[in-house]
Every structure is written in C-alpha cells, then in structure tokens.
Image (cartoon, rainbow, N blue to C red):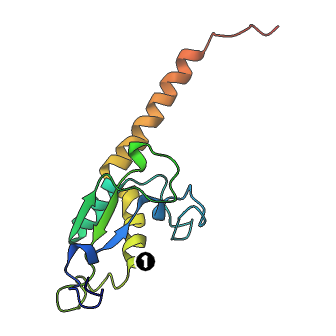
Amino acid sequence: MACAAARSPADQDRFICIYPAYLNNKKTIAEGRRIPISKAVENPTATEIQDVCSAVGLNVFLEKNKMYSREWNRDVQYRGRVRVQLKQEDGSLCLVQFPSRKSVMLYAAEMIPKLKTRTQKAGGADQSLQQGEGSKKGKGKKKK
C-alpha cells in the first residue's frame, strides 16, 4: 500500500470529507461540530453542502450512504458525506479562496441559508402556522 504522500492530491480518496454534523448548530463540539456556533447552520444536509460547493466551482461528489461515526440518528436526512477537492495534481490549490478545509466549511455554512430551498421553506412555514392558528379559534372551554 502506497503512503499518503506518494498519492496524487487529485485522487478522489485524497479529497477532504465534509459531514453535515460539522456545520450543524444543533450539535456540540463533542458531537462533531467543527465551526463556531454563531456561523453554523440548522440541520444542513449533504445535498445542500454539495450544491453550495459545486456552485462556487469546486470539484465535489456526494457519498449518500456514508454516515458520520458520532451521529447516533440513522435517519436518511443525517446520512451523506461530501468529498471536496482542495488541491490539484501538482499540489497547488484548486481555488485560492479555499486554502483549507475550514475555509470550505465556513463558506458552505454561510451560503446554505441563502439557498432557494431554505428561503422557500421559511416563507411557507410562516403561512402554514398562521392558517393553523386561525382554525384553532373557538375550540376549547369558554371563559366566564
């Protein structure tokens, strides 16, 4: 087996891994969060991380059935791992704005709330709550 230094940085097994737990503000550092809670996102998915990274021009691929070892919940929404290429064949950076894995994680956490899927969900949830509250009127005991 060849040592890690002998393999090319462009090999897919040399890409960095980003699990959704790294960016999740619901997790503690012990549970796997790797960025400050103020910059983290609520329950990101691997697909969202992939969308954000590929939109900026990074070479990305999604491994849907991989799971983070510290994740106790086996639900589909918590599954997935994103592999991102940071360095090219010659060892130079793919994109200068991403010199490290932390810079990629911070960028993804910053851009995920701006995704169309996130902004539409927030708008739709408010409307459904208001409709639900309106239908509850009149139910319950009358106050004297």
Q: Where is residue 11 shown, x and y percent of the image? A: 20, 78
Q: Where is residue 19 shown, x and y percent of the image? A: 40, 62
Who is closer to the viewer here, 119 or 6?
Answer: 6
Judged from the image, the secondary structure of the residue bearing numbered disc 1 is helix
Query: What residue is at 51 percent from the left and 67 percent from the top?
Result: 39
Q: Within 10 angstroms of label 1, few (less than 14), some, or many (20 or more) residues?
A: some
Outermost residue toward the front? 1
- Number of callouts: 1
Q: Where is residue 81 shown, x and y percent of the image? A: 34, 60
Which of the 4 quarters of the picture holds residue 86?
Answer: bottom left
The image shows residue 9, relative to residue 82, as above or below, that is below
Query: What residue is at 37 percent from the left and 59 percent from the top?
Result: 112
Q: Quadrant of the C terminus?
A: top right
Q: Quadrant of the N terminus?
A: bottom left
Outermost residue toward the left? 89
Outermost residue toward the right? 144
Amino acid carrying mark 1 in the image? Lys
Which of the 4 quarters of the picture holds residue 10?
Answer: bottom left
Q: Where is residue 80 shown, x and y percent of the image? A: 35, 55
Q: Which residue position is annotated with label 1? A: 102
